[in-house]
Amino acid sequence: MNYIKGQKEFFAGIGQIQYEGLDSDNPFAFRWYDPNRIVRGKSMAEHLKFACAYWHSFNGNGADPFGGATHIFPWDQKADAVDRAKDKMDAAFEFMTKMQLPYYCFHDVDLVDYTNNVAENERRLQAITAYALDKQQESGIKLLWGTANLFSHERYMNGAATNPDFHVLSHGAAQVKAALDATIALGGQNYVFWGGREGYMSLLNTNMKREQEHLARFLHLAKDYARKNGFSGTFFIEPKPCEPTKHQYDYDAATVISFLRQYDLLDDFKLNLEVNHATLAGHTFQHELQVAADAGLLGSIDANRGDEQNGWDTDQFPYNINELTESMLIILEAGGFQGGGINFDAKIRRNSTDREDLFFAHIGGMDLFARALLIADKILEKSSYLQLRKERYQSFDTGKGAEFEKGNLSLEDLRDFAAANGEPEVKSGKQEFLENLINRHI
Ligand code: XLS
Ligand code: NI
Ligand code: NI
C-alpha cells in the first residue's frame, strides 16, 4: 500500500507507521503488530484483518449530549455534498494507508450526507462509490463490510424494519437496497445489520411478535436481493442489548442465534460481536465469542471497550490485555473469523483533539491485538491450558460417560451407576491456577 504522492495531505508530517519492535521509543510505531510475521501458519495481517470504522474516525466529531463538535475536520469544508465526501474519502484513504489498515467499514450516510429524497441519495451514493472503487484500486485497501444507518434519521424513532408504520419500513428497505448495491460494487466481503432502533421503549404500545416477524421478512428480502445481484459474502447480525431502545431485539449472541434459527436465516447470516455490547448485556466478551464459536457462527468482531463505571456504549479503543488474550484464545481455537475481521468500532475521546490522536488510538488497538495473538498462541502451544480443560471432562471419554454422550444410557442407567459407585471424589476447577497461567504468559 503506497500513499499517493502529490495529493493533498490531511495528516501532513506523519509517515507510514512501521513495526519497530519492543526497543523502539517512537510513539508512531508498532511494537507488536508486524503484519508479515507468521503465527500458526498465517501472517498477523491475515489473522487480524483490521478495519477502520468510517463513522467514528471520519464523521464522529467529538460532540456529546452536552456540547457540540470539538474535532474540526479540514475535509468537511466544501459546499457540495459529493465534493465534501470525496475530500473525506481522500483523508480516510490517506489515514488507512499510513496506518497499514487493510480494510474499512461504513454506513451509507458515513460516505456521503443523505437528504429526504430516495433518488437523490442513490445518486450521491453511486457517485461516491465510483470514487471509492478508484481509491481501493490505488491503495489495495478493501471493504470488510458495508451497512445502512437505519437509526439516526427521525423517521426511524420507532425502528426501521420493526417500525409499526409500513411507510417507514419501506424507507429502510430503500436505504438497504442502495447500501447493498454499493457494497457489491466495491467487492465488500460482508454486509452488517446492527439493529439500531429495532426494539421497543414500552410494551404497552408494542406488538413484539409482529415486529420480529417483520424484521425476519426484511432480512430475507435483503438477502434475496443481494444474492440475486451476485453478493457471495456473509451477512452479519451485530447483537446489542440496549441503547438506543430500552430493549433491543438482538439482545446478545444467544438471542440472535435463536432468532436466525427460528426464521430460517442460518445459512446466510453469522454474528458480528462487539466488546462493549457484550458487557452491556451482562456477559464477558469472551462469553459472547464462545457462544458464537460453539454454534459455528463467529463471523467478525467490532473492537472497542466500555468504561467500568458507566452503563453505556462508550466505544473506547481497546486497552485491556487480559480481556483480549482470553478472547484470542477463543478466536484461535475456533479457527479464526468466518469471513470477517477486527473493525475498530471505537472513537477517540472528545478532548483528544490533535490529528495525531487518531493514529495513537489505532496503533494502541492494533498492537494490543497483535500482542494478544502472540500470547494466546504461546498459551495454546506451550502450556497445560488445553490439557487441563480436556482432563476436566475425561470421565466422559470412556466407559459409562462415553455411553451417555452417545445416547446409549437411560435415566435408570444413570441412577444405577450413581448407586453402585458411591460419592464422587472432590475435583478442583483450578481457576486461580489458570488465571496465573494467563498472567504468566502476558
Ligand atoms: C452501535 C453499533 C454500530 C454498528 C454498525 O452501537 O456498534 O456502530 O457497528 O451499525
Ligand atoms: Ni458496532
Ligand atoms: Ni456499538
Image (cartoon, rainbow, N blue to C red):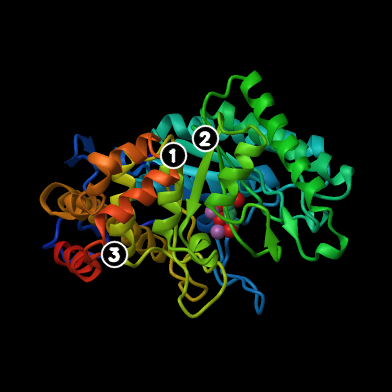
Q: What secondary structure is marked by label 3?
A: helix
Which of 126/259 is in front?
Answer: 259
Residue 195: give x, y in percent of width and height: 66, 50
Q: Distance between the residues labelled 1 and 2?
A: 7 Å
- Evaluate if marks 1 and 2 touch, with contact meaning CB atoms under 8 Å apart: yes
Locate ligand 1 by image quadrant: bottom right
Q: What residue type is labelled 3?
A: Ile
Q: Distance between the residues labelled 1 and 3?
A: 22 Å
Determine whether, in the image, residue 338 is placed left or right of residue 432. Answer: right
Residue 103: give x, y in percent of width and height: 42, 41
Mark sitting earlier along the chain (1/3): 3
Classed neighbour count for the residue bearing mark 2: other residues with Cα under 10 Å, few (<14), some (14–19), many (≥20):
many
Which of 416/269 is in front?
Answer: 416
Classed neighbour count for the residue bearing mark 1: other residues with Cα under 10 Å, few (<14), some (14–19), many (≥20):
many
Q: What secondary structure is marked by label 2?
A: strand
Q: Which dot marks residue 8? A: none
Residue 371: give x, y in percent of width and height: 23, 56
Q: What residue type is labelled 2?
A: Asn
Q: Which amino acid does label 1 sit on?
A: Gly
Q: Which dot marks residue 321? A: 3
Determine whether, in the image, residue 69 is placed left or right of residue 351. Answer: right
The structure residue drawn at horizontal position 33% and vertical position 67%, both measured from the top left corner, is: 320
* Residue at the disc numbered 1: 340
Q: Give the quadrant of the N terminus.
A: top left
Q: Is mark 3 within 8 Å of ligand 3?
A: no
